[in-house]
Image: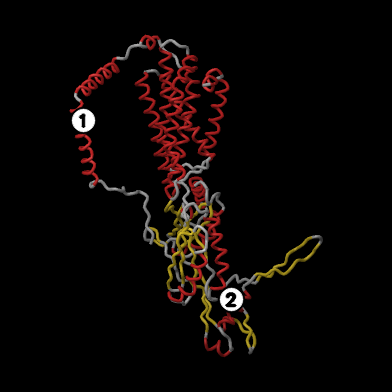
Amino acid sequence: MKIVKLSVLRPVAMSMVLVLLLILGGVSGRNMPVDLFPELTFPVAAVTATYDGAGPKEIENLLAEPLESSMSTLPNVESVRSVSQNGGVLVLVSFTWGTDMNFATLNMRERIDMAREALPEGASLPRVMRFDPSDLPIVQLSLTSENEQILEDLKQIAEEDIKAALDGADGVASVTVSGGAEKEILLTLDQQKMSSYNLTLQDLQQIIGSENLNLPAGNVQDQNQNLPIRITGQFTSIEDIKELPIPTQSGVIKLENLAEIKEAYADADQLSYLNGKEAVGISVLKQSGANTVSVANEIDDRLKELNQTLPEGVKIDTILDQSDFINQSIKSVTSNMIVGSILASIILYLFLRNLRSTIIIGLAIPLSIVTTFVFMYFSGQTLNLLTLGGLALGIGMMVDNAIVILENIFRLRKQGLSKKDAAIKGTNQVGTAIIASTLTTVVVFLPIVFVDGLAAQLFKPLALVISFSLLASLFTALIIVPLFSSLFLKLSTREKEQSNTDGKLFGKVKHFYKRRLDTALRHPKKNSWCSFTSICFILCRNSFYRNRIPSCPRSEHRFCYS
């Protein structure tokens, strides 16, 4: 192969290619998003609408049927279902797998605009929602206080201080606050006074709404400056509401003469507790495609700054942080990859008994992984459990190509060939077989790319990473291993003398295997019955333990929503 001869005879040029791969692989691995699973898209969208005071039968006739009719004409729709209940309807639209949900939801909104005239006047504008796993919070916080006076202001602190600080973090899509007490102004009207002044509730609503506004009032030119004018009318205190003038037939009176006005807390529709204590919950959602670990680290840095500015006694606790589970999972897979690489190098040393050859294989493994990172980055993959699992699975296979070529080069070196001649000839002898065996393995995994449905979204990255790792190992075996062998593979005098003999340990293993093989060939029926009995024993043992081992282990990552 010309590429093998080029790598051996042009070591400087191949070294530059190697440096380029290391740089590209390092940048690719650093910039790849890190997440728990690949990005999942479910072809399901929902339409919700409310109609206060209507029963399920009226909701079905007035809301569900028009919406179902408009949704059923959309392209790629598999099914349309609706759930009607008191005051509202939920319409679920299922599309075929592979449908672009961004365009699908856009078409749904267009159909809703067309069907709006068929809806009753009192109904709310229908909303389109889609189920996206990325909409689940990546970080959940709890704000607590030991001071009862500050406890009433926790929600205000969460909305004005914490929410504002976290919204500015890179990769954060939204921050929602739940629980806590929310203040409101309560007006208790005097019906007798309202009747005596001939006022209605609608009159007061219009007056209060029209007064509680900030309006623009034009511009003023002053010395080449254009100054905007604003009329500030929003209420800033409860005294402004009490002093609000109300025009009546008998004259102008203050609002406090018609109603009792006081500041109170609104009825809570959400309750948040932490360890039995009242708290305020804060949920943080990341942007689509953002790095979960980076966003969580940015949030953690913001929280450290906020803890220094919060009132005394107020504490922020992290209830859920997806990055912790992601880091633990990825560290576990990464450590297994490293241990597997070390064990492969040790086994290779036990067979070849040459330290330089072991170092060459030890360098080929990380080079193959770095090259795989380049393919993953430019194909839009992320570092998650499945892609790293595919990479770990590919490590065992990516060593095979390098070992076969290196062993053949090592054999030719023992026969007396020079380092360069042994590297070129040894690679050419087995190069075609290596290419064929690698491509046959790639052909097994690559068709998973054409699978549809949820399985495609989960296992397509796995199949691609395995294929990328095998192709990277082929590149490393055909170029890097001959290059390193021509530069570093040297034989000691003892190894040259042992070219036609085996070591003591391997000689005994070879002799034991030869005796057992001769015995098996002389008694084929006996060995067949032994093999059949062993298979039956293994199957019976598996069925025996299957009922005693739980099918799904308990996860350490558990949640409880109520």
Classed neighbour count for the residue bearing mark 2: other residues with Cα under 10 Å, few (<14), some (14–19), many (≥20): many
Q: In this view, does 418 lie above or below 466?
A: above
Sequence order check, earlier mark of 2 and 1 = 2
**In the image as oriented, which residue stretches furthest toward the right?**
223
In terms of image quadrants, where is residue 267? bottom left
Q: Measured from the top left, where is residue 84 in percent x and y?
A: 43, 70
Query: Type of residue at label 1?
Result: Ser
Residue drawn at (29%, 48%) of the image: 551
Which mark is in front, 2 or 1?
1
Q: Count the marks: how many? A: 2
Helix, strand or loop for disc 2:
helix
Q: In this view, does 278 lie above or below 337?
A: below
Q: Name the foreground residue: 506 vs 222.
A: 506
Q: Name the foreground residue: 210 vs 331.
A: 331
Distance, label 2 to label 1, CA atoms, is 97 Å
Q: Measured from the top left, where is residue 90 in percent x and y?
A: 46, 67
Query: Type of residue at label 2?
Result: Ile
Q: Name the residue under label 2.
A: 241
**In the image as oriented, which residue stretches furthest toward the front?**
525
> Can residue 255 be seen here?
yes
Classed neighbour count for the residue bearing mark 1: other residues with Cα under 10 Å, few (<14), some (14–19), many (≥20): few
Residue drawn at (47%, 77%) of the image: 53
Q: Name the residue under label 1.
A: 528
Q: Which colour scheme is used?
A: secondary structure
Residue drawn at (45%, 43%) of the image: 460
> Can residue 282 be seen here?
no
Q: Which mark is on residue 277?
A: none
Quadrant of the frame with the C terminus? bottom left
Helix, strand or loop for disc 1:
helix
